[in-house]
């Protein structure tokens, strides 16, 4: 006589609505919490990320309007959707996408058996502390999720791409046109004036403030 246990099958991945709200403390990968699945999003800068700071003055942001958790799968899906639309409309060298939310919070699930006779095998709510199943970003109201810089002529395409990316996230997001120059912290008028004065100098895709240290002869004010 052979005694066979029923086939062991665990339930599938839970939908993200189970992990939408920030209910627990931040729980990150550490030497105590190992065996965490890799994040689905691996690339945070897409497009012409080395384009000079003067090339792309227009910038728009997708801003979160809820305190929630966004899974790494959703962040990757939004990145792909935005990148696809901009590549089709502007061309792959006409924009720079930067993902501003990073998923460090670990999501857990108490795996349950869902096969025939599972009630005899499973332990119910005993030892119910779950195993890591994925990672998510904890975001707050007013936090920037995604920023895109491009030329002024392509502003409408950038806003449409961000609108399409919004559909990958739960909750409410807002799309804001920034008054800053690209990914810098300076307003457009100040940026143009300071670049002419020599107070700012381009440093790749950002800008460097000249603090006038060093020999007097090398200073633009001399």
Image (tube, rainbow, N blue to C red):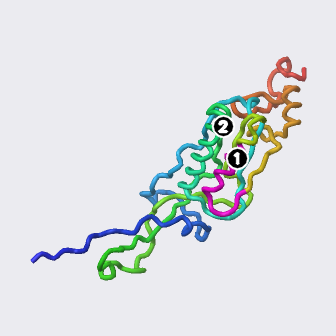
**In the shown orientation, is residue 133 left or right of residue 76?**
left
Residue at point 71% right, 51% down?
62
Disc 1 to disc 2, how far (Cα)? 10 Å
Against 210, residue 119 (above or below) is below
Q: Which residue is mark 2?
A: 89
Residue 82 point in image, percent of width and height: 63, 45
| Image quadrant assignment for residue 60 | top right
Mark 2 surroundings: few (<14), some (14-19) or many (≥20) residues within 10 A: few
Q: Is residue 123 magenta?
A: no
Residue sitting at the far front: 89
Q: In the orientation shown, which residue stands out farthest toward the top?
A: 217
In percent of width and height, residue 129 lies at 45, 72
Q: In the displayed orientation, state which residue is furthest to the left.
A: 1
Q: Please say if 83 is above or below 193.
A: below
Q: Nearer the viewer, residue 176 or 68?
A: 176
Label 1 sits on residue: 160
> Which stretch did the figure color magenta?
158-173
Residue under the point 46% across and 68% down: 109
In magenta segment, residue 171 = yes
Using the image as rendered, state which of residue 168 and residue 213 is in the foreground: 168
Q: Secondary structure at mark 1?
A: helix
Q: 46 or 207: which is nearer to us?
A: 46
Q: Secondary structure under badge 2?
A: helix
Question: Is 108 placed left or right of 121 in the picture?
Answer: right
């Amino acid at each position: 006589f052979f005694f066979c246990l029923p086939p062991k099958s665990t339930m599938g991945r839970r939908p993200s609505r189970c992990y939408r709200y920030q209910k627990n403390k931040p729980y990150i990968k550490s030497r105590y919490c190992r065996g965490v699945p890799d994040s689905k999003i691996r690339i945070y800068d897409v497009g012409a990320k080395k384009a000079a700071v003067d090339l792309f003055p227009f910038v728009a942001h997708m801003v979160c309007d809820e305190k929630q958790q966004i899974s790494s799968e959703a962040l990757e899906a939004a990145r792909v959707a935005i990148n696809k639309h901009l590549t089709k409309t502007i061309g792959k060298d006409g924009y720079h996408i930067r993902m501003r939310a990073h998923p460090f919070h670990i999501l857990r699930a108490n795996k349950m058996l869902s096969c025939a006779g599972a009630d005899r095998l499973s332990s119910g709510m005993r030892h119910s502390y779950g195993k890591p199943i994925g990672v998510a970003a904890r975001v707050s109201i007013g936090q920037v999720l995604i920023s895109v810089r491009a030329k002024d002529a392509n502003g409408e395409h950038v806003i449409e791409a961000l609108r399409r990316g919004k559909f990958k996230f739960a909750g409410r997001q807002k799309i804001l046109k920034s008054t800053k120059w690209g990914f810098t912290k300076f307003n457009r008028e100040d940026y143009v004036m300071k670049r002419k004065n020599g107070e700012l100098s381009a440093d790749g895709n950002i800008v460097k403030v000249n603090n006038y240290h060093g020999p007097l002869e090398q200073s633009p004010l001399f």
